[in-house]
Image (cartoon, helix red, strand yellow):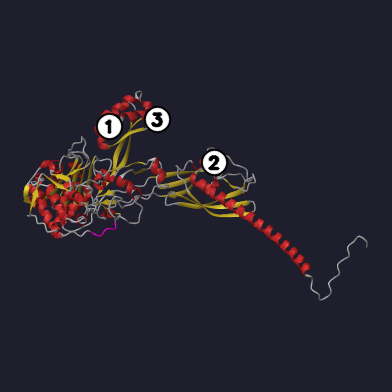
């Protein structure tokens, strides 16, 4: 027909289609397949996006439950609309949990179209751990931006909670473990105390009351007045906690003061306020910082270790509080509380130390007699049992603050000459060799002098040792190599790696190798870069007394390094190569010579005040260690020594000299034990 295109002739039977026809057909087929694949990929991508959005909502909910704050969890109602009341509802559910928060992890997320369910694994830090699973509905936000949120109900927190119930916890403190002494008897045990406080509503003169309490109790009156005036009227404003005996001695003066109130309780206490206090630490009400960092182990109001060993081993000593968790109905709701968890308290375990109560009391009392250029001298005394290496006493004054006896780092002064002598003996020096002791001597331009400019002239080395002649040792230092003093120190424990076996932080000291003749001369008399703690010097004295090496011990149980929670590392950050150094190998023959020389220090030298102490002969070495700068640098006073099976070291900061300042403390200590 006119106007219509003629139809293409049909291909003849057996004839293949033309190449053009085949390509057109193939192109149509590919286009159809590609369109289907693209549609499938788009659909799969959208499904993955929904899965990811639902899981993100579950993760945000888990984080919000763990934090007690749904601010980042996007709470929604069942239709996907925002739920502004969810945060308040969660706070109500948790308000009775005393600040405890659970760990929450997403166990699984199952989605069916626009609806999903998250399974959450919840673990509370109560009892031995309270764990369960719970579920939460997840919905896409009605805004349509692809974001999902979670539907909050009380059952999301705990699966059995109804809409009118909340959680509440009650804790029963566990019996705190005791700190035991070397003999297994308790040296820290529950003792009666009285908390002295002020109730603002009961006083009309807060400033006057604070002034009178400050005078009676040695507290900061200005700080107390500020706390009283800023507190609520019926608050208990703490002033001080007194041992019952101390309170009884002051009660007649305290009770008549208007506004002063009292609460009786018990606390783990040592036999006396001074008893190894810096080492043992103290126990009291947990601070907010300790509560926050405990992972739920410590709750507000708990009694816990605040410092020292009580803090280091708090997890062991404290035990586990008894816990009861209930589902409590809202006010006006039907029904009563339901028990969800009951866990009995688990008593704390003891910590046993090597301290000997009798020796510790003697050390504390002796330090109280220390005198120096300071009005209230800082001092330390450490005693070690020679046969066993047990640390028998760790005393500090002031009793609060740093444990200078264990962790202090001081130049040991002439007490280090006992170590230097072992190195000199190895070079062939004999005690009877005549060695000059001039008033001053110079090494490469550096002048060294004796205490108060003394000069002995040319005398046997044994006399130089007994009279602590600096210039004699400085003159002999040229016999020593760079490594000789560090090796001699390590042989008696100074600078060794034994601190990791004590169970508490401690410094073993530091004796660096040095090629410089001036530095080596200074080191030979315990000055320059040589540093040691009183503990390290007491350990050195015990090694000299024994003639062989025995590692010191302080915490006996748990064994230091045992795999249990102690709250802190038992290795010392200030010890040299802790746990890695080889065991010291002292030369017994040289130590025997040093023992004889230390006896002469007592019989005819700088520690002669110890010559008539009852009991076994006393061996000692005094030291006056300069520190700081100036023409006449300030000094610390030292004495180390041993009597029978007891080795000791005494340090008095800013003391005039070892013989006049430290020796009297050692004498008082040894006489108390005679």
Q: Is residue 338 visible?
A: no
Secondary element under disc 2, as helix, strand or loop, is helix
Residue drawn at 32 percent across, 27 percent down: 210
Across and down, in percent, residue 395 comes to 22, 44
Secondary element under disc 3, as helix, strand or loop, is loop
Looking at marks 3 and 1 on the same chain, the residue that comes earlier in the sequence is marked by: 1
Q: Is residue 152 left or right of residue 368?
A: right
Judge by depth and name the residue closer to the eye, 612 or 407: 407
Secondary element under disc 1, as helix, strand or loop, is helix
Q: Main secondary structure of the magenta part?
A: loop
Looking at marks 3 and 2 on the same chain, the residue that comes earlier in the sequence is marked by: 2
Across and down, in percent, residue 131 comes to 48, 52
Q: Which residue is mark 2?
A: 87
Quarter assignment of residue 271: top left
CA gap, disc 3 and disc 1: 21 Å
Quarter assignment of residue 486: bottom left
CA gap, disc 1 and disc 2: 47 Å
Circle 1 crowding by C-alpha within 10 Å: few under 14, some 14–19, many from 20: some
Residue drawn at 23 percent across, 48 percent down: 529
Q: Which residue is mark 3?
A: 231
Looking at marks 1 and 2 on the same chain, the residue that comes earlier in the sequence is marked by: 2
Q: Is residue 374 visible?
A: yes
Q: Which residue is mark 1?
A: 217
**Residue 580 is one of the magenta-drawn residues:** yes
Circle 3 crowding by C-alpha within 10 Å: few under 14, some 14–19, many from 20: some
Magenta region: which residues? 579-583
**Residue 527 is one of the magenta-drawn residues:** no
């Amino acid at each position: 027909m006119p106007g219509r295109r003629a139809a293409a002739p049909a291909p003849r039977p057996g004839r293949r289609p033309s190449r053009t026809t085949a390509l057109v057909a193939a192109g149509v087929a590919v286009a159809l397949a590609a369109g289907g694949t693209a549609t499938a990929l788009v659909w799969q991508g959208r499904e993955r996006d929904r899965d990811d959005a639902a899981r993100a909502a579950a993760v945000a909910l888990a984080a919000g439950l763990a934090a007690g704050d749904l601010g980042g969890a996007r709470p929604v109602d069942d239709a996907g609309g925002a739920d502004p009341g969810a945060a308040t509802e969660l706070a109500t559910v948790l308000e009775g949990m005393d600040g405890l928060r659970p760990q929450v992890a997403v166990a699984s997320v199952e989605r069916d179209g626009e609806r999903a369910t998250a399974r959450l694994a919840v673990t509370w830090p109560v009892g031995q751990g309270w764990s369960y699973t719970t579920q939460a509905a997840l919905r896409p936000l009605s805004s349509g931006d692809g974001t999902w949120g979670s539907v909050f109900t009380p059952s999301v927190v705990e699966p059995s909670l109804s809409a009118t119930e909340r959680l509440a916890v009650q804790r029963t403190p566990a019996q705190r473990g005791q700190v035991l002494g070397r003999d297994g008897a308790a040296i820290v045990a529950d003792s009666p105390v009285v908390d002295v406080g002020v109730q603002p509503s009961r006083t009309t003169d807060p400033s006057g009351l604070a002034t009178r309490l400050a005078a009676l109790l040695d507290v900061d009156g200005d700080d107390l007045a500020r706390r009283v005036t800023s507190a609520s009227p019926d608050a208990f404003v703490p002033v001080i906690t007194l041992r019952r005996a101390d309170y009884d001695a002051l009660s007649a003066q305290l009770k008549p003061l208007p506004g002063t109130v009292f609460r009786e309780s018990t606390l783990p206490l040592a036999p006396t306020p001074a008893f190894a206090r810096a080492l043992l630490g103290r126990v009291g009400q947990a601070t907010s910082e300790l509560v926050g960092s405990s992972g739920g182990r410590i709750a507000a109001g708990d009694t816990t270790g605040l410092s020292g060993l009580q803090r280091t081993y708090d997890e062991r000593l404290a035990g586990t509080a008894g816990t009861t968790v209930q589902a409590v109905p809202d006010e006006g709701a039907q029904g009563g509380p339901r028990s969800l968890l009951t866990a009995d308290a688990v008593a704390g375990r003891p910590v046993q130390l090597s301290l000997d109560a009798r020796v510790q009391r003697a050390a504390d009392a002796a330090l109280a007699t220390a005198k120096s250029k300071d009005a209230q001298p800082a001092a330390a005394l450490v005693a070690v049992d020679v046969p066993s290496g047990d640390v028998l006493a760790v005393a500090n004054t002031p009793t609060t603050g740093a444990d200078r006896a264990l962790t202090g780092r001081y130049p040991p002064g002439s007490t280090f000459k006992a170590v230097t002598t072992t190195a000199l003996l190895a070079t062939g020096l004999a005690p009877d060799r005549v060695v000059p002791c001039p008033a001053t001597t110079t090494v490469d331009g550096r002048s060294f002098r004796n205490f108060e400019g003394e000069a002995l002239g040319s005398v046997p080395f044994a006399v130089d040792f007994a009279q602590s002649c600096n210039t004699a040792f400085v003159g002999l230092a040229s016999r020593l190599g760079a490594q000789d003093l560090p090796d001699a120190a390590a042989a008696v424990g100074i600078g060794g790696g034994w601190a990791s076996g004590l169970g508490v932080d401690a410094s073993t000291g530091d004796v660096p190798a040095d090629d410089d003749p001036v530095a080596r001369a200074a080191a030979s008399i315990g000055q320059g870069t040589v540093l040691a703690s009183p503990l390290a010097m007491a350990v050195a004295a015990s090694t000299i007394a024994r003639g062989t090496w025995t590692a010191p011990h302080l915490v006996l149980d748990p064994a230091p390094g045992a795999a249990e929670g102690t709250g802190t590392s038992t290795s010392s950050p200030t010890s040299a190569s802790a746990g890695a150094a080889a065991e010291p190998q002292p030369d017994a023959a040289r130590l025997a010579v040093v023992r004889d020389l230390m006896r002469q220090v007592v019989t005819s030298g700088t520690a002669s005040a110890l010559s008539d102490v009852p009991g076994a002969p006393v061996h000692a070495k005094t030291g006056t260690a300069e520190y700081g700068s100036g023409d006449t640098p300030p000094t610390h006073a030292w004495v180390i020594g041993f009597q029978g099976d007891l080795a000791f070291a005494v340090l008095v900061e800013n003391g005039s000299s070892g013989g006049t300042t430290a020796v009297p403390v050692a004498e008082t200590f040894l006489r108390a034990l005679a």
